[in-house]
């Protein structure tokens, strides 16, 4: 069955990440745990389709409260596919987003990109570092080396970020066979993202540190818990 092929590719890629990216994931988890211990935020950014990762973390059950999704309407598909694709090429737009995202010193910014050559992602990374934040990139090194960057700096995201995690996905994230159907990038990138969060929380728990986590919304008690958490941090968040 073609479904078996799809699942097998996902398993193979996840196994590569577990084998070859464990050290980088551990570094990322330690960086994030230090930020959370000092009540600094972890900001998640992606452009176009990759904005789903920023949406995924906002008040998500099982996610610590000091995680913020950077949402820009212009880069989202809600504004139109053409506008989204053109804005991600606009030099300086990532700097505007960074300045309006309340990124502060000792925060962490995670940028998820297919190849890491998008001008908006590179600008955001450079500006975030100028603000004193650390940058983690999650991308495909295979794709990064298959295309040339157009950014004036001449650099790719993986040449700028403090920590780079290779997601090992094939070109464009699509299962590479005669069908060329079945994109695995969302499954893989979300697995990495939530895996890093889980490891960071474990580091804090092992140190005897408490971590505030969003709960489900199924009961009044859980909803009240989440609203109280939101009240404690809402002044530090700024939707774009």
Image (cartoon, rainbow, N blue to C red):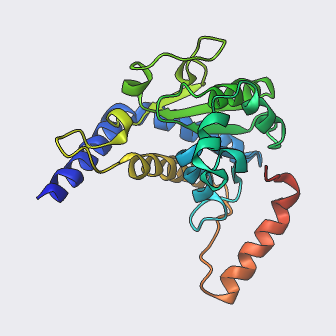
Q: Could you say where residue 192 lies in the image, as x and y percent from the top left?
A: 45, 46
Q: For this view, does 31 lie left or right of residue 6? A: right
Q: Could you say where residue 95 lies in the image, as x and y percent from the top left?
A: 77, 30
Q: Toward which corner of the image does residue 62 lie, by quadrant? A: bottom right
| Front residue of this view, candidates 51 and 103 | 51
Q: Could you say where residue 198 lies in the image, as x and y percent from the top left?
A: 51, 53
Instruction: Residue 105: tell me if it is visible.
Output: yes
* Residue at (66% x, 31% y) in the render: 120
* Residue at (64% x, 50% y) in the render: 76
The relative height of residue 98 versus residue 7 in the rendered view (above or below) is above
The relative height of residue 139 versus residue 181 in the rendered view (above or below) is above
Q: For this view, does 105 lie left or right of residue 149? A: right
| Front residue of this view, candidates 99 and 204 | 99
* Residue at (73% x, 77% y) in the render: 225
Instruction: Residue 46: tell me if it is visible.
Output: no
| Front residue of this view, candidates 155 and 107 | 155
> Looking at the image, which residue sits at the far right?
235
Q: For this view, does 236 lie left or right of residue 198? A: right
Location of the N terminus (image quadrant) = bottom left
């Amino acid at each position: 069955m073609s479904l078996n092929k799809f699942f097998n590719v996902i398993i193979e890629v996840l196994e590569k990440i577990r084998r070859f990216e464990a050290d980088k994931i551990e570094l990322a988890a330690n960086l994030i745990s230090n930020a959370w211990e000092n009540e600094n935020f972890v900001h998640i950014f992606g452009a176009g389709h990759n904005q789903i990762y920023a949406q995924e973390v906002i008040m998500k059950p099982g996610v610590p409260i000091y995680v913020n999704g950077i949402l820009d309407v212009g880069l989202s598909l809600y504004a139109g596919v053409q506008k989204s694709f053109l804005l991600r090429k606009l030099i300086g737009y990532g700097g505007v987003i960074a300045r309006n995202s309340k990124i502060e010193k000792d925060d962490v910014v995670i940028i998820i990109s297919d190849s890491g050559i998008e001008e908006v992602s590179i600008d955001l990374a450079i500006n975030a570092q100028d603000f004193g934040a650390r940058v983690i990139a999650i991308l495909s090194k295979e794709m990064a080396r298959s295309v040339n960057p157009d950014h004036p700096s001449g650099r790719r995201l993986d040449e700028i970020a403090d920590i780079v995690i290779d997601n090992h996905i094939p070109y464009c994230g699509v299962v590479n066979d005669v069908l060329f159907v079945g994109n695995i990038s969302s499954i893989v990138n979300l697995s990495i993202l939530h895996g890093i969060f889980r490891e960071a929380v474990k580091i804090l728990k092992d140190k005897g540190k408490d971590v505030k986590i969003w709960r489900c919304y199924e009961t009044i008690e859980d909803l009240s818990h989440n609203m109280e958490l939101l009240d404690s941090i809402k002044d530090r968040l700024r939707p774009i």
